[in-house]
Image (tube, helix red, strand yellow):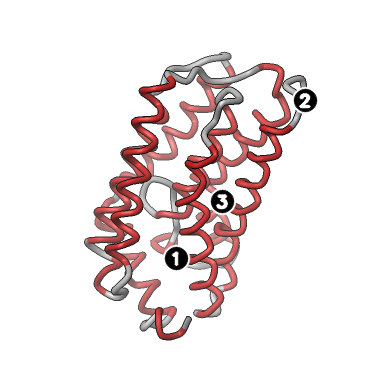
Amino acid sequence: MDRLIPYSANVYGTIVSDHNLSVWPLQIFVLVLCLSVIGLARRGGANNAALMIVAAFWIWCGVHFHIMTYATINWAAPYFGYAFIIQGMSIAVWAVMTRTQFIEPQRRMWVWAGIGLIISAGALHPLLLLIMSTPLSHAEVAGVMPTPTAILTIGILFLVPRRAALWLLIIPVAWSIWDGLSAWTLELSIGLVLPGMVIIAALGLIMSLMTPPNR
């Protein structure tokens, strides 16, 4: 793994900080989006706008973070970027083809799980950095950084009816495994939190599709 990560934790932190500053204040828009999705969910329904925005986030992260930024320190980053673009296009096509309507009231427990993930995607990492007295410029937020975007995506999939496509989990889980291994190699303990959440959330989504609809 060391050969695949030819940079230090400080170098990666600088890359993340520069990336965040270059797109500011997009992070604020993402937080507003998260609250909007939750508001739509509480009203009992929504159209595909949230999924289309999430699809745009995947493409944005693929191009702006992976291909334009992360590629400066990691030779594999462009390939991650192409995978993220494919994921974004897949979400958009799936949303259009299924015309998914949000929220099944009978799945209340899983709905709350999705809402929790959506909030976490926008606010968890910044809060952890505040607790650790780390500069907020290093914060990973959905729509701007890859792993929180994966969390946001799975959170929204918790809110859709029972035909949520499990194949949409492949790229988020694969990336999160890589991100977790990278954090382990760089000895970034805080960097293990978000990848771990993606894996647990993906398992939870699979479980939600296996449980009776009145749970």
Residue 162 versus residue 144 in the image, above or below: above
Count neighbours of disc 3 (C-alpha within 10 A) and say few if under 14, some if 14 to 19, many if 20 or more.
some
Q: Position of residue 54 (x, y in %)?
A: 39, 37
Which residue type carries mark 2? Arg
Whether 76 is drawn above or below 127: the answer is: below
* Image position of 195 (left or right of 3): right
- Judge depth for marks 1 and 2 and give the one in front: 2
Q: Which residue is mark 2?
A: 215
Please, which residue is most extreme toward the left here?
68
Q: With 175 as the anchor, is 110 left or right in this view?
A: right
Q: Nearer the viewer, residue 71 or 161?
A: 161
Question: Which quadrant would residue 193 be assigned to in this image?
Answer: bottom right
Q: Are marks 1 and 2 in contact (CB under 8 Å)?
A: no
Q: Choose the circle earlier in sequence order: 1 or 3.
A: 3
**Residue under circle 1?**
135
Which image quadrant for residue 82?
bottom left
Q: Residue at x 41, y 54 (%)?
A: 146
The circle drawn on residue 65 is none
Residue position for label 3 = 124
Choose the circle earlier in sequence order: 1 or 2. 1
Across and down, in percent, residue 83 comes to 34, 53
